[in-house]
Image (tube, rainbow, N blue to C red):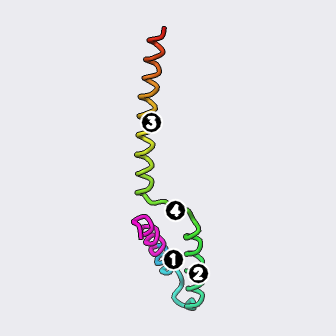
């Protein structure tokens, strides 16, 4: 299991535990299981991204912006040499 999948599984488990803690104690186990299963299915269907994935994409975007700035400066330099 990758770190990302582990983090997502841990998030789902923590959410299920939190939901379970909010359910009334006198609720039947079958109803609790159905609610937990519904929450799990809903979370599994979401395209959840981890903080690590966001940070990686931010770094990629930052490098791309730097490269674009460098290329724009180079284009401006070449254009000014042609004049």
Task: Locate residue 35 relative to residue 58 in the image: left or right.
Answer: right
Contact between labelled residues 3 and 1, with CB atoms less than 8 Å apart: no
Viewer-nearest of labels 1 and 3?
Answer: 3
Residue 25: give x, y in percent of width and height: 51, 88
Q: Is residue 36 above or below residue 49?
A: below
Mark positioned earlier in the residue sequence (1 or 3): 1
Residue extent of the magenta highlight: 1-14
**Distance of label 4 from label 2 (alpha carbons):** 20 Å
Disc 3, SS: helix
Give the camera-side residue of 25 and 80: 80
**Distance of label 4 from label 3 (alpha carbons):** 26 Å
Residue under label 2: 35
Contact between labelled residues 3 and 2, with CB atoms less than 8 Å apart: no
Disc 1, SS: helix
Residue 46: give x, y in percent of width and height: 57, 65
Give the camera-side residue of 75 and 24: 75
Q: Residue at x 45, y 69 (%)?
A: 11
Residue under label 3: 65
Residue under label 1: 19
Q: Is residue 78 above or below residue 4?
A: above
Mark positioned earlier in the residue sequence (4 or 1): 1
Contact between labelled residues 2 and 4, with CB atoms less than 8 Å apart: no
Q: Is residue 3 magenta?
A: yes
Mark positioned earlier in the residue sequence (4 or 3): 4
Task: Locate residue 68 relative to residue 42 in the image: left or right.
Answer: left
Give the camera-side residue of 40 and 18: 40
**Distance of label 2 from label 3 (alpha carbons):** 45 Å
Q: Is residue 9 above or below residue 50?
A: below
Residue under label 4: 48
């Amino acid at each position: 299991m990758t770190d990302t999948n582990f983090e997502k599984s841990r998030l789902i488990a923590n959410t299920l535990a939190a939901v379970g803690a909010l359910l009334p104690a006198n609720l039947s186990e079958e109803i609790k299981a159905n609610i937990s299963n519904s929450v799990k299915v809903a979370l599994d269907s979401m395209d959840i991204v981890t903080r690590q994935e966001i940070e990686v994409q931010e770094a990629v975007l930052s490098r791309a912006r730097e490269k674009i700035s460098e290329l724009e400066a180079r284009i401006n330099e070449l254009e000014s040499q042609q004049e």
